Amino acid sequence: MARQRSIHPEIWTSDAVGRLPLPARLLWIGIFSTADDEGRLKGSPEHLRATVFPHDRLSIPKIELWLALVEAEGMIRRYSVDGRQFIAVINFRRYQRPKYPTPSKLPAPPSEGTSASSW
């Protein structure tokens, strides 16, 4: 099912977002705009390249670098379950309020070490 996401106005003045290089900012917007209603999505760089940058010829190492930068700013949490990579958007429900939320079909991140940082 298609989802509509809003870009919260605070994104433009956020120090964390501002520290990211411009391509990583675009990746960040792509991450939360393609996440499910619980803020989860498949997290492999290959999947993100295909969903966020389908028209661009970007290398997997570039996507991996930008992912690491977004994670270092505390905006996402990357995790693996059964060898598959996933992403959980930190504070997703603070900035996104789905009208009719659907439970995630993706596994939840492990509970320990969850950050509560803000964008």
Image (cartoon, rainbow, N blue to C red):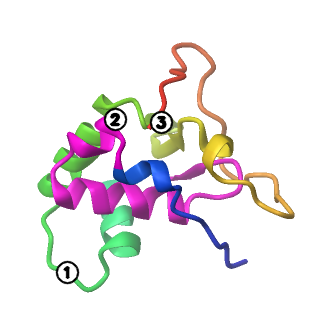
The residue located at (20%, 61%) in the rendering is 23
Q: CA distance from mark 2 to mark 3?
A: 14 Å
Number of residues whose C-alpha sits closer than 10 Å to that of mark 1, classed few (under 14), some (14–19) or many (20 or more): few
Question: Is 37 one of the magenta-colored residues?
Answer: yes
Q: Specify the farthest residue to the right.
A: 100
Query: Circle 1 sits on which residue?
Result: 56
> Up-down: is 99 above or below 11?
below
- Residue 47 higher or lower than 72, as above or below: below
Residue placed under numbered mark 3 in the picture: 80
Quickly name the residue at label 2.
71
Q: Secondary structure at mark 2?
A: helix
Residue 47: numbered disc: none
Q: Quadrant of residue 85?
A: top left
Q: Earlier in the sequence, mark 2 or mark 3?
A: 2
Q: Position of residue 88 (x, y in %)?
A: 54, 41
Residue displayed at 39% across by 29% down: 74
